Amino acid sequence: MWNQIYNPLGNATLSTIAAAIPVVTLLVLIASGKVKAHIAAIIAVILTNLIAIFVFTMPAGMSIRASLLGIVAGFFPIGWIVLNVIFLYQITVATGQFELLKRAVGGVTEDRRLQLLLIAFSFGAFFEGASGFGTPVAITGSVLIGLGFSPLAASGLSLIANTAPVAYGALGTPIQGLASVTGLDPYTLGAMVGRQLPVFSLIVPFWVVWAFAGWRGMKDIWPAILVTGLSFAIPQFVISNYINPWIVDIGASLISMGCLILFLRVWQPKQLWLSPALRGRDESASTMTAPKPMDKTGLTQGELWSALLPWIIVCVVMLIWGNGAFKTWANSIFTWNYPVPDLHNMINKVPPVAAKPTPEGAVFAFTYLSFTGTGMLIAAIISGFLAGFSPARMIGEYGRTIKLCAISLITISAMLAIGTLTRLSGVDATLGLAFAATGVLYPFFGTLLGWLGVALTGSDTASNILFGNLQKITSEQLGLSSVLMGAANSSGGVMGKMIDAQSIVVASTATNWYGHEGTILRFVFKHSIALACLVGLLVMLQAYVYPFTAMVLK
C-alpha cells in the first residue's frame, strides 16, 4: 500500500506550486499556439509522471500504470463518443441530409444569433442531458460549422453555451457522483444546484450572443434571448426541486426549444445578422472556405423528415442509452472489468481529504454496450442504412473518419492520462487543500475548486468525486452547509467545462479546425473565469447574506 502525501515538500505553498506545474505547463503550451495540442499533452503526461514520482513519492510502477489506465479511459468513453459523432456527421453530409438540416434551421431563422440560441444552447442542452461527456459540443460544433459559422465561433461558442446544463448532464450523473462520495441525498443536492444554476441559465444565452455579436447585436434580439433563458431556467428550477435531478436537462431543453421556435413564428429581429464570424477580428474567419449560399427554398414534408431523421434516431437512442435500467441491464451482461494489477486498491486517500484511509480503485470498466459512443455508433449505422448506404460504403466512411480524428484521439487519451494520474497521485488533492485554506472566503474559493476540478479532469462528475468529500469536510469545519458547498462544487465546475483540454480538442475536431486549440483556449478562458467568479459570488451570498441564505437547503 502507498499513502498519498499532500505536502511532500514540507511547505504548503511549495507543494501547491509543484502540484500546479503539470496543468499550468499544459495550458501555457496550448495557449501559446506554438505547440500542437497532442505534443503539449504528451509533454504534460511526462512532466506529471516526473512530479508524481520524484516530488509526491508515488512508486514509479504505479505512476506508469495510472497513466496507461488514463490513456485507455481517454478513448473509452470520451474518444469513442467523438469518433462516432463525427462518423454520424460525415454520413449526413455524404447523403445530403445535412444540407437539408441547414435549410430546415434557416427556415426557422436565418439570423446567426438566433441559430446560436436554438442550436448551441437549447439543442446542446438536450444532448448534455441525454449523454454528456463531450457529445453536445461535438454535435453542436459540427452543426454550426456546417451552417457556415467560422471555426472559432462554432467551437468557442459551443463551449460557452455548454455550461449551465452540465451539472445535470448524462441524466444527472454528476449529482449521483457527488452523492456517492458525500453521503448526502442526491435529491437534496440536485435541488440545491437548482437554486444556483437557473440564474446562469438566464445569463448564459445573453453571454453567448454578446460574445458573438457584441452588445448592440445582443440588445437587438433581447426578447428572444429572454424567452430562451427563462424557458430553460424555470423548468430547470421546478424539475430539480420538485421532481428529480435525472431529467432536468431533457425537460428544460425541450421546453426551451419549443418556446423559442413558437416565439420566432410571431417575432423576428428588425435586422438579420447574417455574418458567420465573431464580431471584430476573427482570425479563424480567414481560414475558412466561404460557405455556399443557403438554399432558401422551403422544404417539402418528406425533405424535412429526411433532414431530421438522423437526429431523431440519435435522440431516441441517447434516451435509451442514458436510462438507468438499460445501463444496469447492459452492464450486467456486456461488461469486462479489469482491475489494474499493483494499482487497484493499492493507494490510500488519507485525511484531511478523506475522513479515514480509503483505498482508491483503479478498474478499467469496459462496459462496451452501454458506452454513449456505442449508442452513437448504432444511431449512425441505422441512419446510414436508412439513407441507402451499403455496408462497404459504411466501412469506407468509418475508415476516413478514423483518419480524420486520429490526432485528436491521441490528444484526448493523453489528457485523461494526466487527469487519472493527478487523481491517484494526490496532486489534485494538494491543489484542493490550497483552496480549502481560505477561511471565510471559502464559499467563493470552494466554488472555484469545482471549476479547477473540471478544468483538470474534463468532467463535472469526476470533479465532484474528486473534491466532493473535501467540500463536505471543510464546510463542516467552517460551520457552513455541506449541501451548499457540495452543490457549489458542481455549479462552479460547469464553468470549467469550456476550458478543459478534452472539450477544446473535441471542439476543434468537430469543427475540423485542428492545430488551433490554443486560439480556442485563449478565446474561452476569460469567459470561463468570469462566469466561475460570478457563481462564487452567488454562493458567498447564499452562505452569508439574507435573503439568499433562505435558499440554502440543509
Image (cartoon, rainbow, N blue to C red):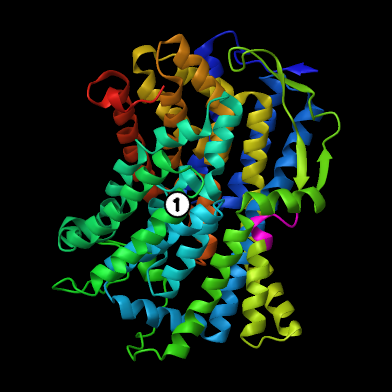
What is the chief secondary structure element of the magenta stretch?
loop
Judge whether 344 appears above or below 155 on screen: above
Between residue 216 and residue 353, name the one nearer to us: 353
Q: Position of residue 148 (x, y in %)?
A: 38, 74
Image x and y of residue 261, in percent: 31, 70
The residue to which callout 1 is attached is 249
* The C terminus lies in quadrant: top left
User: Is residue 541 shown to the viewer in this render?
Assistant: no
- From the viewer's perspective, tell me whether residue 157 is left or right of residue 423: left
Q: Residue furthest right?
A: 341
Q: Is residue 3 visible?
A: yes
Magenta region, residue range = 367-374
Please name the residue shown 19% across and 63% down the image. 221
Q: Residue at x 20, y 59 (%)?
A: 218
- Tell whether 141 sits left or right of 509: left
Q: In the image, residue 523 lies at what x, y percent?
A: 37, 51
Residue 432 vs residue 546: left or right?
Answer: right
- Residue ID at (36%, 64%): 257
- Going by the numbered disc 1, the residue's amino acid type is Asp
